[in-house]
Amino acid sequence: MEDFLGKYSIYIVLIIVLIVWGGIFGFLNILDRRLKKLTKEVAVEDVSSAPESSFKKN
């Protein structure tokens, strides 16, 4: 086992780094989707709750 770890340590580090970067990418992707959904919900609420007189030009 020690021989394996000594011989292929760079590959083990590479795999761990790729897993960490994959987790960061996945987290940011999920966060982006949630933020887009919230932005759409807020935009819809702002439009529906705004008084109509604010949209009319005098």
Image (cartoon, rainbow, N blue to C red):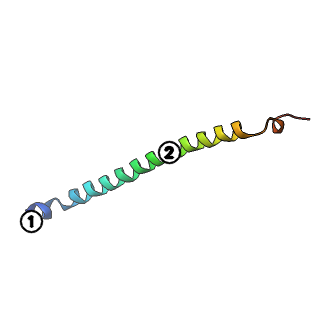
**Could you tell me which residue is drawn at 62 percent across and 43 percent down?**
42
Q: Position of residue 38 (x, y in %)?
A: 56, 44
**Could you tell me which residue is drawn at 78 percent across and 38 percent down?**
51
Location of residue 26 with respect to 44 vertically, above or below: below
Locate residue 50: give its quadrant: top right
Lateral position of residue 47 relative to residue 17, left or right: right
* Labelled disc at residue 34: 2
In terms of depth relative to the viewer, which is nearer, 52 or 13?
A: 52
- Amino acid, disc 2: Arg
* Labelled disc at residue 2: 1
Q: Position of residue 56 (x, y in %)?
A: 85, 34
Which quadrant holds the N terminus?
Answer: bottom left
Lateral position of residue 12 relative to residue 54, left or right: left
Lateral position of residue 1 relative to residue 57, left or right: left
Locate residue 46: give its quadrant: top right
SS of the residue at dot 1? helix
Q: Of marks 2 and 1, which one's residue comes earlier in the chain?
A: 1
**Could you tell me which residue is drawn at 59 percent across and 40 percent down?**
41
